[in-house]
């Protein structure tokens, strides 16, 4: 089945049913923004845009991959979802692929089952805006200096 705005909206709704460590921020972003271009390669990826003036919680500090989460499905391959942010740290792209490496078109009647895992997997792993921590000797952001 061809990618569609409805599918994109369905995937966003599905993500919000998940207990994600940044769920509240994601909810505010999805409420403020809208689905844009749809990928036409057979996956169900889509662009997302949060208006500049929107008052939302940022997902991370800057542009790039933010989170990856994978689910088993009623098909042999998993469903892989990747979230990207723009330079403002707001949701800008969602990859939704059949199989971790997008091995084929997303089946129209695919149903996500259990969550296989997520990266970053816990709130402390999230590439959030760094806050100084008194007891921190080696926090992830220090490797980027
Ligand atoms: Zn695609």
Image (spheres, rainbow, N blue to C red):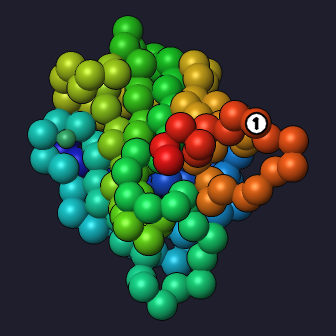
Query: Mark 1 highlights which residue?
Result: 137
Q: Residue 28, percent across and down?
A: 62, 70
Above/below status of 13 relative to 69: below
Q: Residue at x 76, y 36 (%)?
A: 137
Query: Residue 54, can we see it?
Result: yes
Above/below status of 137 relative to 99: below
Furthest-bottom residue in this view: 53
Around disc 1, counting alpha carbons within 10 Å, would you say few (fewer than 14), some (14 to 19), or many (20 or more)? few
Q: Residue at x 49, y 44 (%)?
A: 144
Q: Residue at x 52, y 61 (%)?
A: 61
Furthest-top residue in this view: 76
Above/below status of 17 relative to 88: above
> Would you identify the image quadrant in which residue 50 lies?
bottom left
Furthest-right residue in this view: 135
Query: Residue 17, can we see it?
Result: no
48 to the left or right of 38? right
Q: Residue 7, percent across and down?
A: 36, 50
Picture quadrant of ligand 1: top left
Q: Residue at x 42, y 85 (%)?
A: 52
Q: Quadrant of the N terminus?
A: top left
Q: How many marks?
A: 1
> Would you identify the image quadrant in which residue 114 lies?
top right
> Between residues 3 and 144, which one lies in front from this camera angle?
144
State the SS at label 1.
loop
> Between residues 83 and 123, which one lies in front from this camera angle?
123
24 to the left or right of 71? right
> Between residues 125 and 119, which one lies in front from this camera angle?
125
34 to the left or right of 107? right
């Amino acid at each position: 089945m061809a990618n569609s705005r409805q599918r994109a909206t369905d995937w966003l709704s599905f993500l919000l049913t998940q207990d994600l460590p940044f769920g509240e921020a994601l909810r505010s972003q999805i409420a403020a923004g809208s689905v844009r271009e749809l990928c036409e390669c057979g996956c169900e990826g889509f662009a997302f845009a949060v208006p500049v003036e929107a008052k939302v919680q940022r997902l991370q500090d800057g542009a790039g991959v933010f989170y990856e989460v994978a689910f088993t499905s009623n098909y042999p391959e998993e469903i892989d979802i990747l979230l990207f942010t723009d330079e403002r740290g707001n949701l800008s792209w969602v990859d939704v692929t059949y199989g971790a490496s997008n091995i084929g078109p997303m089946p129209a009647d695919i149903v996500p089952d259990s969550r296989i895992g997520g990266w970053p997997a816990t709130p402390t792993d999230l590439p959030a805006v760094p806050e100084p921590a008194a007891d921190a000797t080696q926090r992830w952001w220090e490797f980027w200096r």
